[in-house]
Amino acid sequence: MNISQVPRGALSLQDVVKIYDPDGSNVMAVDHCSLEVAAGEICMIVGPSGCGKTSLLNAIAGFHDIDRGSIRLDGEVLCGPERRQAPIGPDRVVVFQNGALFPWKTNLENIAFGPIAQGRLSRAEARGKARAMMAEAGLAGYENDYPGQVSSGLRRRVEIVRALINDPAVLLLDEPYRALDALTKSVLHEALLEIYYKTRKTIFFITHDLEEAIFLGHRVVVMTARPCRPKQIFDVDIPHPRDYGVLTSKRFREIAAEVAEAVNEEALKSFSRGEREG
Amino acid sequence: MSIAEPHRPALAEAVARWAEAFRRPTLYLAVLGYALMLGFWYVSVQVLKLPRFSQMPALTDVVREWLSRDPAYGVSIFTPIYYQHILVSLRRIAIAFALATSLGVPVGLLLGWSKAFRDYVFPLFEMLRPIPILAWVPLAIIMLPGDELPVVYLTFLASFFATALNTMLGVKSIDPAYLLAAQCLGASRWRIFAEVIVPGALPFIFTGLQISIGVAWFSLVAAEMISGQFGLGYLINTSYTTVEYPTLVIAMFTLGIVGYSTSALVRRVGEGLMTWRTRQLAMDGRG
C-alpha cells in the first residue's frame, strides 16, 4: 500500500466554542472544549445523544465554523480567530453516520473518486490503485457492484477505503457502525484495526457504543451532556494489536465499568432534559 | 426470475423469458383487463343498446374500419393519411419534448443548485405553472406565426414545467452527506455538479420526463384540436364535426398506443442511464 507510515495527524483543539443561533435561541453545542489527539492515535469520543459531539467533528472537518478557540492539525491552524471555518479537504476525510457512498457509482468508482477529483492521479491510475486497495482490504470481487447491491457492513468497509486512498492525516468517523448488528460490527471492528495497524492513521471516532469505544481506542473521551466538553478521559491500557479476546479480559471489564459510570451520569442529565437524538 | 446462467445464448434467453411470462398471472390479467373493457363496449352499445350509447360507434364497426383496405371514412391502417397524422403528431411531440427537456433540465438543476437563481425565478415559475395550456392558446396564436409554431409551443410549455419542477425537486432530494463527502474527497464545485448533483437528481428527472411526455400528448391534442392541418388531435376534432365516429375512436386508440410507446421509450432510456438504481431496486425485490 502506497501510504506513508510516518505518524501524522496530531489534532489540537483549544477552547473550542460552537453556538447555534438559528432563531436567537443561542444554543451552545460545544463549550470551551480542549483536547489533544496524538498523531497515530485512535481517539474515541463518547457522550450522550445530542451532546454536540458531531458539532465538534463537523468543526474539524470544516463543515461549519466555530465561535471561539482554535483547531490545529500538525501545528497548522485549521480554524481560529482569523479564520472561523476550516477548509474542507482530503487531509480530513469524514465517514458518515448513514454512509455516503455515491449510489450511482460502483464501489471501485467511489474509491477512485478522490484521487481523480484532486487531480493527483489519472483515471486509469486511480482505478488501478483503488483495485489494489480493495484487494488488500479483502474487498476483491465487489469492484463493479453498486453500493446498493452489497451488504451495509461491506459498504462501510468500502467507505473507509474510499477515505484512505487519499492518504488523509485524520479519519473522522461519525458513528459509522451505528445502525449495524453486533455480529457485523465485530467484523468491522477487526477490519478497521487491521487497516489501522497497516496505516497508523489518526482516527477520531464518535460512538455511542462503550464496548466499541474501549475495544478500538487508545483513549476514550467521555463528553458532558450539552454543551459538550471532555468530562473525563480514560487511557485504555490494553496493548495493541488487539483482537476480540480482550473483550472478556478483566482489565477490559474494569475500564468498561468506569467509563459506563461516567457516561451514565451525563446520559441521565441529557435524558432528563429530553435531548433529541442527533 | 430464476437465477440466469451466465452464458446462455440470446435466443434461448428470450424463449425462457417468454415461457416465464406465460407462467405468471401478470400477462393473463392484462389480457383480461382489455377483454373486460372491450366486452363492456360491445355489450353496452351493440347488445343492450343503452340509451345514451346509441350514437356511439360500435366495436365491430371501429375494428372493421381500422383494418379495412377501403375504409368508409378514409382512415385505416392501409391509408397513407393515417400515418401522416401519426407522423405529424410524433414530430411535434419530438420537437416539443426535446426542447422542454433541453431547457427544463438545466433550469431545474439551476433552480435546485443556486439559491440566488431560485429566488429570482421560482416565484415567476410558480405563477406561470398553474396556467392551463388551453388558456395559453389565444396568446400562442397571436404571438407565433404559422400553424406549426403555436402547436409546438403549447406542447412544449406544460412539458417544460413538469421537467423543470421535478429536476429541481431531484436536486433538493439529494442527501447533503453526498455533497459533504464529495467536498471532503477534494471535488471542485463543478465536479460536484457533474458527478453528484446530476446523477443524484436523475431518478427525479426521469420521473419528470415520464410526466412530461404524458402532458406533452395532452397539450398536443388540445392544441391540434384548435389549430393545425394534421395530427391525431386534428383528426379527432374533424371526425367529430363531420360525424365520422369510427375514425374518431381509431384516432383515440392510436393516441393511446403511440403515447404508451413514447412513455415506454422514456422509461427504457431512464433505466439504461440508471443501472445502479435498477439493480438496487431489484435487490430490494421491487425490480
Image (tube, rainbow, N blue to C red):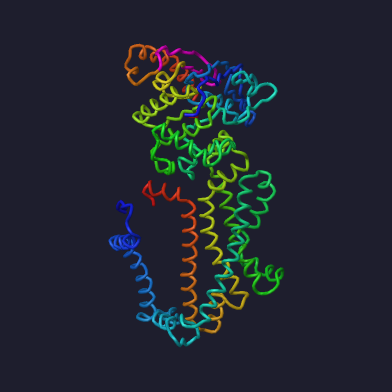
The x and y percentages for residue B119 are: 68, 46
**Quadrant position of residue A189:** top left
Which residue range is magenta in the image?
A220-240
Magenta highlight on residue A168: no
Q: Is residue A234 magenta?
A: yes
Furthest residue toward left: B23
Position of residue B57 relative to residue A75, above or below, is below
Q: Is residue A241 left or right of residue B94?
A: left
Between residues A88 and B10, which one lies in front from this camera angle?
Answer: B10
What x and y, as percent, mark residue B201? 54, 48
Q: How many circles with numbers are drawn on the protein?
A: 0
| Residue A153 x %, y % | 39, 34
A200 to B234, vertically: above or below: above
Q: Position of residue A210 (x, y in %)?
A: 41, 20
- Which residue is pictured at 49% across the width and 53% down the height? B273
Q: Is residue A34 above or below residue A166?
A: above
Residue B21 sits in which quadrant? bottom left
Residue B268 vs residue A8, the one in the foreground: A8
Name the residue located 52 percent from the left edge and 38 percent from the top edge: A126
